[in-house]
Image: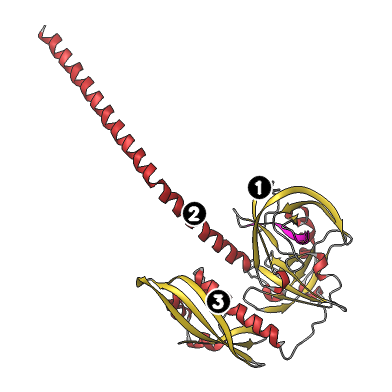
Amino acid sequence: MQKQKKVTIFFLSLLILIFGLAFILFFINNLQKQDIDVGQPLVIYQEQILDTDNLQHLIHEAQKSVVQINVQTRNTERVGSGFLYNSRGDIITNAHVIKDAISIEVTMSNAETYPAAIVGLGEDKDIAVIRVPQLINYQPIEIEATDQYQPGTEILAVGSPLGFQNTVSIGIISGVDRSFDINGYNYENVYQISANITHGNSGGPLINRETGKVIGINSAGIEESDIGFSIPIPTIIDDVTEWSTSITNDQLTFPTRVQNLTPDPEVFEEEALYLIDYFFNSLVINDYINAYTLLGSSLHSELDYPSFRSSYVHFRNLSLLNSEIINSTSETIQLSASIQYEDLNDLNNLKTAKYTFTIGYEIDQLKVLMIVKE
């Protein structure tokens, strides 16, 4: 009898313990769910900020491999775009951009300019490859050579429309398998995109916003609309690879380059303003190395990279308020630039600063020759 009583007490204690543990687990689980619900808007907000930062970084890195192509024929001049796709200094562009060229020059995002030679030129396909030996071992943009993409894929169309360096349009692939003929070129099974393609950004890359890889070549557009067409990389990769691997630098023939001993004043001023804008854009994205490469040799000798970086690393949320030319000669341009930023050492107050830049050519490349903080 006493033994049976002990067994009963044991089982009752066990049941009480089980119910107690179950209640505690239920309470903790419910409390965790409530915390997640309350914090959810903050989590989404942070993810949105991160997505914006990632997009800004993606665009900045892609622009380093995108070039502006300036072409001179016997009768006209034209501007197009292209992108560096291998370590040989080879650039993919459209055939219609460089057709009949007697002079081809490419301008990088850092304003460096080099002559280019034709490696391959499509007859029916609107594709071409040009080479710049000075860009050997430069970092090319990554391409997606196998996958075909479907409508709804988010894209970036990068180019230099109307001569403005590295303009970016954001859109989607709105159609696939479009086919038509324009000016003797056969466009077969191309992407239709919700971003207009002008004469200036023909040949630029179509980039998958999610991966950052090039998935097409921007080639044609319908005027006064947001409809463009891009050639998928898988349809042309065999051609461009064969061209690139079948010719050596010794076999290249450079079109005649027209040397300008004195730069056009208007172009000189536009490029100087662009260079400073690109300088501060590099600082915004924390790409201090890229900003440092824009400086001339005299500044490099006076200011090593760690010292340069320490001058700007405490800047946050930097924005260029304005920039204007204050003096211009045939050799140099002086311009002032005002910026606004938050200082990591004093986040409670917005600060402003004004700089005077001297811009000029050094070994045929546009460089920042002097920086004075006022």
Which residues lie in the magenta part?
A: 213-224
Residue 272 in the image: above or below residue 157: below
The residue lying furthest to the left in this view is: 2
Question: Disc 1 residue type?
Answer: Gly
Closer-to-camera residue (292/197) = 197
Q: Which residue is mark 3?
A: 279
Give percent across and percent down for residue 180.
85, 53
Q: Residues within 10 Å of mark 1 (few under 14, many from 20)?
A: few
Judged from the image, the secondary structure of the residue bearing numbered disc 3 is helix
Q: Residues within 10 Å of mark 2 (few under 14, many from 20)?
A: few
Was residue 150 drawn as part of the magenta stretch in this picture?
A: no
- Would you identify the image quadrant in which residue 228 lies? bottom right
Question: Disc 3 residue type?
Answer: Phe
Residue 291 in the image: above or below residue 42: below
In the drawing, does residue 189 fall left or right of residue 195? right
Which residue corresponds to the image point at 47% horizontal and 53% vertical from the top-left? Answer: 47
Mark 3 or 2: the one toward you: 2
Mark 3–mark 1 distance (CA, rounded to whole Å): 34 Å
Q: How is the image coloured?
A: secondary structure
Judged from the image, the secondary structure of the residue bearing numbered disc 2 is helix
Q: Which residue is mark 1?
A: 152
In the drawing, does residue 60 fall left or right of residue 198? left
- CB-based contact (under 8 Å), mark 3 and mark 2: no
Q: Residues within 10 Å of mark 3 (few under 14, many from 20)?
A: many
